[in-house]
Amino acid sequence: MRPTKHTNALHARAGFSLFELLIVLAIIGLLAALVLPRFGDAFGKAQEKTTKAQMASLQIAVDEFKLEYGRYPSEDEGLTALVKRPDWIDEADWDPKLDKETLPIDGWKRDFIYKLDDNFGFRIISYGADGTPGGEGENEDLDIRK
């Protein structure tokens, strides 16, 4: 059986041209440029919510520490006093304030900053996405004052 002119034309046009592939890639790139920033915003919000939840947990633990031992942890002891017994507390009297052996970290995988404050008692701070004081949006500091 001999191929007809019609079947030869179909075989000759079986693939995509380079120009067609470039157009498809450009369209995919434009769609990605529109959609991906929305996912980035959602991810940043999740980190902020995680950080706020961890800060609230730490705030409760610091308050419990004060109720049981009569004072807030010093700045030198820091938040570590919530999971590791300070030297001035007898072993028999020691009750860790967090169920974990390590301290929680903020949503950006950094340690929280703990400071005593004459006006508020204490502060727990996260410096946001950029890890430096100040900033706006995702880089804004999160601060609990008690």
Image (spheres, rainbow, N blue to C red):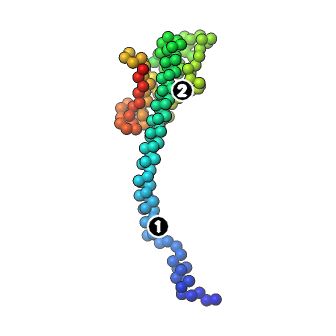
Secondary element type, mark 1:
helix
Answer with the quarter of the image where residue 82 lies: top right
Q: Measuring 57% from the left and 88% from the top, which residue is drawn there?
A: 4
The residue that appears at 60% across and 11% down in the rendered structure is 93
Q: Nearer the viewer, residue 102 or 56?
A: 56
3 lies above or below 88: below
Q: Position of residue 51 (x, y in %)?
A: 47, 32
Identity of the residue drawn at 37% across and 38% down: 137
Image-based side of 123 in relation to 5, left or right? left
Residue at the far right: name it.
1
Number of numbered discs present? 2
Q: In the visual, does 73 lie left or right of 132?
A: right
Density class for disc 1 (Cα within 10 Å; few <14, some 14-19, many ≥20) is few
Question: In the picture, which quadrant includes the N terminus?
Answer: bottom right
Which badge, 1 or 2, comes first in the chain's sequence?
1
Disc assigned to residue 21: 1
Q: Is residue 75 in sight in this rendering? A: yes
Relative image position of residue 89 (x, y in whole percent): 56, 11
How far is the residue under mark 1 from the one under mark 2?
A: 52 Å
Disc 2 element:
loop
Amino acid found under the numbered disc labelled 2: Leu
The quarter in which the C terminus is drawn is top left
Q: Callout 2: 10 Å neighbours few (<14), some, many (20+)?
A: some
Question: Which residue sits at x=41%, y=27%?
Answer: 143
Residue that mark 2 sits on: 103
Please, is residue 84 above or below residue 26 in the view?
above
Amino acid, disc 1: Leu
Q: Is residue 110 visible?
A: no
Residue 3 image position (x, y, % from top left) = 59, 87
Q: Residue furthest bottom?
A: 2
Are discs 1 and 2 less than 8 Å apart at CB?
Answer: no
